[in-house]
Image (spheres, grey):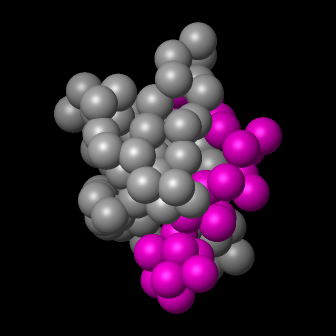
Amino acid sequence: MEQLSRFDVARYKGVLMVVVESDLLPPDPAIVVIPLLPDYPVVKLLNPHIQFDEMRLVLATRLIAAVRRDSLQRIGDAADQGDQITRAVDVLMAGV
């Protein structure tokens, strides 16, 4: 299984994804991710811009999904923007 950590950025079928699953959970064949898209509607706090590898992408929070871990290829991380990513998930789940 691919070693992935929270806030890692990985490629899935040509789309960049950020891992949002806690590192405290036991390993599983699936992992929870959110797509990073260049053209996605921005909603304040829900869909922040994420800077990665000189690209400005939108966290498409409502497209949160679980994918097979072995279908992801890690290419970097967005840990420096972890607070924004966590806030977006909180807004999605709790509305605040």
From what the image shows, is residue 57 above or below residue 6? above
From what the image shows, is residue 79 above or below residue 22? above
On the picture, is 8 further left or further right than 71? Answer: right
From the viewer's side, name the closer residue of 5 and 61: 61
Query: In which quadrant is the C terminus drawn?
Result: bottom right
Q: Which residue is farthest left?
A: 13
State the image quarter where residue 45 is shown: bottom right
State the image quarter where residue 36 is shown: top left
Residue at left 43%, top 55%? 43
Residue 70 within the segment the image draws in magenta:
no
Residue at left 50%, top 83%? 95
Q: Which residue is farthest bottom?
A: 94
From the viewer's side, name the closer residue of 18 and 29: 18
Residue at left 40%, top 46%? 42
Q: How many marks?
A: 0
State the image quarter where residue 8 is shown: top right
From what the image shows, is residue 11 above or below residue 31? above
Image coordinates of residue 13 in percent, x first then y, are 21, 33
Image coordinates of residue 48 in percent, x first then y, are 54, 47
Q: Which residue is farthest front?
A: 44
Image coordinates of residue 63 in percent, x first then y, are 28, 59
Q: Main secondary structure of the magenta part?
A: helix
Q: Which residue is farthest top?
A: 54
On the picture, is 58 further left or further right than 25? Answer: left
Q: Is residue 31 visible?
A: no
Q: Is residue 49 visible?
A: yes
From what the image shows, is residue 50 above or below residue 86? above
Q: Which residues are magenta?
A: 74-96
Residue at left 52%, top 55%? 44
Image coordinates of residue 67 in percent, x first then y, are 29, 59
